[in-house]
Image (cartoon, rainbow, N blue to C red):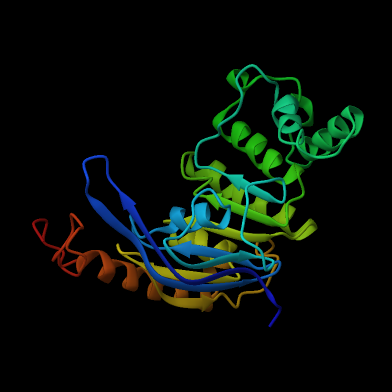
Amino acid sequence: MAPPHLLFSSITKTFHGARGGETLALNNISLVVPKERFVVLLGPSGCGKTTLLRLANGLIRPDGGTVLVDGKAPEPGPETGFMFQSYRLIPWETALGNVEFALRALPLSPSDRKQRAMHYVELVGLGKFAGSYPSELSGGMKQRVALARALAGEPHTLLMDEPFASIDAQTRELMQIELMRLWSLRRATVLFVTHSVDEAILLADDIVLMGPRPGRILETISVDLPRPRWTYDLHAEPRYIELRAYLWDRIRELVRTDPGSDFYGRDFTSAHPGA
């Protein structure tokens, strides 16, 4: 196995509320992410998936344990791209300007910066809309700008927090294919958060299944389906069907047995409306 690019060792993290309460978000998390691996964090809401991304970017620090990126403590910077669920575009900048803005921390001349930004705007299929403002773009187009912005710095690490959750189903599928295509051209190490079993299987080399709060890793599953996955009917593959059924069963059971869940104790196998 390749040497780890991301290393989480015995991580614990507690958040302190404004009124003095405490929430143990992560408990004894250990995870190794090899270089250029596409790893998806999958699990119920509140299991600490986003907290792991923030730790990997150095936005927060663990209370216990160690986080390392290429052997060093992580710090926010251009070597790490972060793509959020919301677009977070600058409204007074054009599509091209938003991508250029992300490159200002790099040692690039203005002309090189504009050239690189335009390259990535064209890669996501928005070359004709480079001069358009966010208010003039559809939701899917805004998310393409956000993807171009995350990739334009050519980061070694790409952290993605449910980036396609807020767009319609059809556009989401297209964005998933776009992400896979771009990742195949220039591979970064990806840590991707989702609640979607189908999205996890489509994108991942490895799926890390996490349990409810306090967040913990239950198992890591290798997705042994051939790439590129947009060139065939993935959903018809026996291995896809097997993985999907297994993961859904695990997640249903996690939600059913979590005392903090609205579905605690629910019998999901019953067809009775009041079950």
Instruction: Please give the name of the residue rendered at 21% of the width and 65% of the height, measured from the top-left corner.
Output: 258
Q: Is residue 87 above or below residue 94?
A: below
Quarter of the rendering containing residue 6: bottom right
Front-most of residues 51 and 253: 51
Instruction: Note whether residue 179 is visible.
Output: yes
Q: x, y percentage for residue 260?
A: 19, 58
Instruction: Please give the name of the residue rendered at 88% of the width and 33% of the height, measured from the top-left corner.
Output: 115
Q: Is residue 230 above or below residue 117?
A: below
Q: x, y percentage for residue 47?
A: 35, 60
Q: x, y percentage for residue 180?
A: 67, 56
Q: Is residue 82 above or below residue 36?
A: above
Which quadrant: the C terminus?
Answer: bottom left
Instruction: Please give the name of the residue rendered at 78% of the width and 40% of the height, measured from the top-left corner.
Output: 120
Quarter of the rendering containing residue 270: bottom left
Front-most of residues 150 and 134: 150
Which quadrant: the N terminus?
Answer: bottom right
Q: Is residue 32 left or right of residue 70?
A: left
Instruction: Please give the name of the residue rendered at 76% of the width and 42% of the height, measured from the top-left corner.
Output: 152
Front-most of residues 43 and 230: 43
List the single residue furthest toward the top: 92
How many badges with numbers are in the image?
0
List the single residue furthest toward the left: 274
Front-most of residues 3 and 134: 3
Instruction: Note whether residue 233 is visible.
Output: no
Q: Is residue 208 left or right of residue 146?
A: left
Quarter of the rendering containing residue 197: bottom left
